[in-house]
Amino acid sequence: DLMADLAAEIAAGFDDECGDVVVTYLDASPLQECSLNNNGTYTFERTFSFTVEDECGNEIAVPCEVTYSGTCLPICTRG
């Protein structure tokens, strides 16, 4: 699961004195298909965020926005 992998990578980037952190994912936009524009290009947008919270209740939001526009449909891979 791509979102679980991203959450794990975000959690690994935090060093916290209050213990382990928990990363949760919030999808702010519905899943949508790529749309073909009149000029022959495709567009795709996604907005989501991760919240990182430590054992003391401190939290921070990590917003993410992905916008794609091009002549070929995007293919997502994990590098």
Image (tube, rainbow, N blue to C red):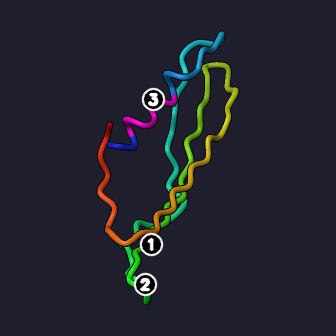
**CB within 8 Å, label 2 to label 1:** yes
Q: Residues within 10 Å of mark 1 (few under 14, many from 20)?
A: some
Label 2 belongs to which residue?
A: 37
Q: Amino acid at mark 3?
A: Glu
* Dot in front, 3 or 1: 1
Would residue 51 be found to the left or right of residue 37 on screen? right
Q: In the image, which disc is placed on residue 78? A: none
Residue 6 among magenta residues: yes
**CB within 8 Å, label 3 to label 1:** no
Q: Residue at x 54, y 23 (%)?
A: 13
Q: Amino acid at mark 1?
A: Thr
SS of the residue under disc 2: loop
Label 1 belongs to which residue?
A: 43
Q: Is residue 19 above or below residue 41?
A: above
Q: Residue at x 43, y 84 (%)?
A: 37
Range covered by the magenta-colored residues: 4-10
Would residue 54 be found to the left or right of residue 35 on screen? right
- Place residue 74 in its image quadrant: bottom left
Q: Is residue 34 above or below residue 74?
A: below
Please report whichever mark, 3 or 2, sits nearer to the chain's N-terminal start.
3
**Which of the two residues, 50 or 38, is positioned nearer the viewer here?**
38
Would residue 66 be found to the left or right of residue 2 on screen? right
CA distance separating discs 3 and 2: 34 Å
Q: Residue at x 37, y 35 (%)?
A: 5
SS of the residue under disc 3: helix
Label 3 belongs to which residue?
A: 9
Residue 78 among magenta residues: no
Residue 47 spot, x, y in % from top left:
54, 58
Q: Is residue 24 above or below residue 44?
A: above
Residue 55 spot, x, y in % from top left:
61, 19
CA distance separating discs 3 and 1: 27 Å
